[in-house]
Image: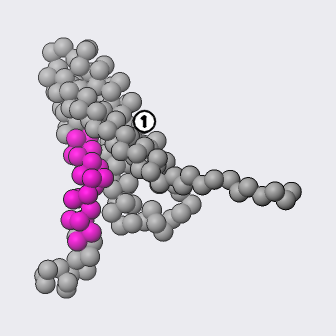
Amino acid sequence: MAETEGSPFGGCLEKLKSYVRTRKGTILTAEILLSFIILVCYAASKHGGYSAVAICEMVFAIIFFIVFMMELDKQFLVVNWLWSDLFRAVIGAALYLITSLICVIGGSGDGARIAGGVFGLVAGILFAYDCYTIFLDIKSSRQHTAAPTDDTV
């Protein structure tokens, strides 16, 4: 603790350590790592064009990781961060599942492409789980208030 107080990044490292231990931090960290593994697999395959999905999803996951870790979602209220994260996760799950099925089915003779496809299927399931947890957060954050019942018009 004493060595992080003097460094300029001490507060950031503490936020990083505490955020990675949360459920959302763990999911985003796993998404980033899986996207990197998929990127390496697709880059090593004969058809490297599938790596665009992994690059985009890794960059978006890093952006949302930083936003939620630094609690910028509470400062920039113009963007609805929960819904944006939900759209990111839905699109990521769909793209990973589609491209991974294409790679696994048509990747005969290209081991790196098949490995990327298998990791992509795992990533698609992880992104779908992220969608589910975000949906639960949105559902629990709604305020169900009754409409006022005024007799005067």
* Residue reaching furthest to the front: 151
The front one of 78 and 53 is 78
Q: Specify the segment rendered in magenta.
A: 14-35
Q: Position of residue 77 (x, y in %)?
A: 53, 63
In reply to whether residue 20 is colored magenta, the answer given is yes
Of residues 126 and 31, the one drawn nearer to the viewer in this rendering: 126
| Main secondary-structure element of the magenta-colored stretch | helix
Query: Is residue 43 at all visible to an observer of this figure?
Result: no
Q: Quadrant of the C terminus?
A: bottom right
Residue displayed at 39% across by 30% down: 94
The residue identified by callout 1 is 91
In this rendering, the answer to whether 4 lies above or below 76 is below
Q: Quadrant of the N terminus?
A: bottom left
Please give left or right for residue 107 compared with residue 71 in the image: left
The answer to whether 27 is drawn above or below residue 19 in the figure is: above
What residue lies at 25% left-to-right and 15% top-to-bottom? 105
With 139 as the anchor, is 127 left or right in this view?
left
Whole-percent x, y for residue 138 in the image: 46, 49
Residue at horizontal 33%, vertical 63%? Answer: 69
Amino acid type of the residue that numbered disc 1 sits on in the rendered structure: Ile
Badge 1 density bin: few <14, some 14–19, many ≥20, Cα 10 Å: some
Residue 115: in magenta span: no
Q: Is residue 87 left or right of residue 104?
A: right
Q: At numbered mark 1, what does the secondary structure look like: helix, strand or loop? A: helix
Residue shown at the point (29%, 50%) measured from the top left = 28
Point out residue 23 in the picture as x, y percentages from the top left corner. 27, 53
